[in-house]
Image (tube, grey):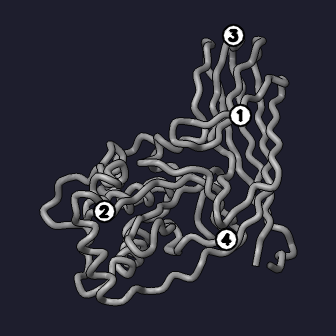
Amino acid sequence: MLKEYTVTYRSDNVYENWVHDAYWQFLILPLENTTQELLDTDFSNSIHAINQFSINGFGFNTIKVHPKKRFKQISFEAIFKVLKSENKEIKNVSESENKKSLEEINTLEFKINFERFLKSTRLTLLPKLETPLFQFNTNASLFENLKLLNNWVHVFLKYSPGVTDITTTLDKVLLQKSGVCQDFAHLFCAVCRKNGIPSRYVSGYLNHESGYLGDSQMHAWTEAYLPHYGWLGFDPTNNVLTNSNHIKVSHGKDFNDCSPLKGVVYSQGTHKTSHSVVVKSQQQQIQQ
């Protein structure tokens, strides 16, 4: 089955004084891969500044905006139409294949190839603890352990909007045992990397019609790499494997690589900014 979604992203910005110059980069375009196809893109702003489509250093499509006139208010709106398919069914590998996977992730070649997603960052650094937060079960496969980790993060942290921000590190998250989707994703990645499994932070959109947790902006989940499987998606906020309700935009080492909006604004005084995301599915699913 295929599902068609309409994603509406909006950002409203009001400044106390004139903005004389500004630069923005939006990382909000849905990625095209084996499970999703971008059917249509419409991006506009209220002062009719020119949009420049480009590719960032991680290989993801971005939209850059550099207004040529001063302003006190500017709104951005993006409407994407995306076609999603279900991920292929994931099955456990045999005991001998799992043993080979364990041997492979401990080789020097593997560690070199996946170095970027094995190293801790400021946002995925685990504090020093007397006992490990989560221990892998040696009697279970790597895939089963990742599902157990997904469930553990989901249970260990309470979803609480407003208690953290984009700079919050894991020591605070672990102390208060609460956070939002980015904190769930950072903790999952941290434990994976601690156990030699490459993991990456994923930014995207979530269809809330299925009752999933997540705020009104962009959602965060994770991908972990296992031999014999490749990159697998896990959403610890909702304790599920990623599916047709997850629309991927980008991935990186942590939130900083995937920030949906980066920019510089030259102005004085206060300003107010709001962001919203609405994901709607077509009433009728499309039969493959």
What crowding class fits label 3: few (fewer than 14 Cα within 10 Å), some (14-19), or many (20 or more)? some
Quadrant of the frame with the N terminus: bottom right
Q: Secondary structure at mark 3?
A: loop
User: Which of the two discs, 3 and 2, labels the residue nearer the N terminus?
Assistant: 3
Cα separation between marks 1 and 4: 26 Å
Cα separation between marks 3 and 2: 45 Å
Residue 98 placement: quadrant: bottom left
Please state which amino acid type lies under the numbered disc 3: His
Above or below, 267 against 127 in this view is above
Cα separation between marks 2 and 4: 26 Å
Q: Nearer the viewer, mark 3 or mark 1?
A: 1
User: Which of the two discs, 3 and 1, labels the residue nearer the N terminus?
Assistant: 3
Where residue 227 appears, x then y in whole percent?
38, 71
Residue identifier under label 4 = 244
Q: Nearer the viewer, mark 3 or mark 4?
A: 4
Q: Residue at x 27, y 63 (%)?
A: 196
Residue identifier under label 1 = 53
Q: Nearer the viewer, mark 2 or mark 1?
A: 1
**Residue 174 falls left or right of residue 26:** left
Whether residues under marks 3 and 1 lie with C-beta atoms below 8 angstroms apart, the answer is no
Residue identifier under label 3 = 20
Please state which amino acid type lies under the numbered disc 4: Ser
